[in-house]
Amino acid sequence: MKTKQHTATHLFEVNLYIQQAVFALAIILCMFSVISPAIALLLGVLIVNVFGNPFIAFNHKAIMYLLQFSVVGLGFGMNAASAISAGKEGFLLTIFSIFSTLIFGTLLGKWLKTDKKTSHLISCGTAICGGSAIAAISPVIKSNENQTSIALGVIFILNSIALFAFPFIGHQLDLSQKEFGLWCAIAIHDTSSVVGAANKYGAEALQIATTVKLARALWIIPISILTALIFNKKSQNSGTKIKIPYFIGLFVLAMLFNTYVPATAIVAPHIVGIAKIGLTITLFLIGATLNINTLKSVGVKPLFQGIFLWIFIAALSLISILYLN
């Protein structure tokens, strides 16, 4: 009996070592330019479904902190004047798209009879900034682990598709750098996939997309307060705190340094290079959350809601950019 237990323990340890070695090797590969952000995401999906993820307990925090570090680093490659100009252009479109997405998402959820809290999380994730919005809104509405996981699963699946689909569609429609930057900032859920897709399209698209998306992320604050009122849980009495994305301030600071402090030019390209590596690793880690069980747990109704809502915002924002801007 002891021999069997010892053998089972030994096999478990060997399997764990193999998982860790494969995972570490993949991260090392992501540090080199041969692995693009999109390929890194696919690599993560492949590895988690073949070998498993030995660091699943730390995955979410690693994604959050690494993404924030990468976004701040990208600020050292951007010009403040251009960013302000892009922000102004995207402001009205941002407001219109956020509220139209939330309204349509609510109606769609009722029509599909999706769980109310799951429906609201998917709507907020689509309207603002994907997983970050869901993480901020979930404690406000007191969603349970299953509701939050389903919403995150829907958003992560669609983000993965967007990383490949948007640059392809952009080239097919012959969108300019400016048009594509605005479009992916409005229509792609997570900041990680927005930056990944825009970076693939071009430097100007990256600057516009990052600036507009981060300005959009600030809407987490008013939408969280509005959510608290809608769900009859006044924020001061709910016992929860609204998560404010403070790292956006560091991004702005990095951009100001790059624009107005000439000495920054010496180190800025290196910081941007490291930030892009960080983004590639972030997308690998996101891919490593998409195992078969995650995909199965999503369910048909929430997935349909996410897809319909995504098509709605993608089409609406594209038409607005092409014909109303």
Image (cartoon, rainbow, N blue to C red):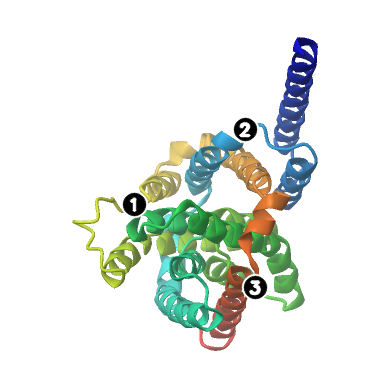
Contact? badges 3 and 1 (CB < 8 Å): no
- Location of residue 256 with respect to 179 vertically, above or below: above
- The residue lying at 43 percent from left, 64 percent from top is 216
Secondary element under disc 2, as helix, strand or loop, is: loop
Residue 310, horizontal then vertical, whole percent? 59, 73
**Measured Cα–Cα span from mark 3 to mark 1:** 33 Å
Q: Which residue is mark 3?
A: 176
**Figure check: 88 above or below 195:** below
Of callouts 3 and 1, the N-terminal one? 3
Indicate the amino acid at tag 1.
Ile
Crowd band around label 3 with a 10 angstrom C-alpha radius: few (<14), some (14–19), many (20+): some
Name the one closer to the observer, 18 or 188. Answer: 18
Q: Residues within 10 Å of mark 1 (few under 14, many from 20)?
A: some
Mark earlier in primary sequence (3, 2): 2
Query: Quick one: which residue is furthest to the top in this view?
Result: 2
Q: Residues within 10 Å of mark 2 (few under 14, many from 20)?
A: some
Residue position marked by numbered label 1 in the rendering: 244
Lower sequence index among marks 2 and 1: 2
| Along the viewing direction, whichever of 264 and 163 lies nearer the viewer | 163
Q: CA distance from mark 2 to mark 1?
A: 27 Å
State whether residue 227 is above or below residue 244: below
Horizontal and vertical percent position of residue 248:
40, 50
Q: Position of residue 181 (x, y in %)?
A: 58, 67
Label disc, if present, on residue 55 of the rendered structure: 2
Which mark's residue is nearer the viewer, 3 or 2?
Answer: 2
Mark 3 or mark 1, whichever is nearer to me = 1
Please state the total of marks drawn on the protein image.
Answer: 3
Report the front residue among 188 and 257. 188
Q: Which residue type carries mark 2?
A: Phe
Amino acid type assigned to the residue bearing label 3 in the image: Ser
* Element marked by disc 1: loop
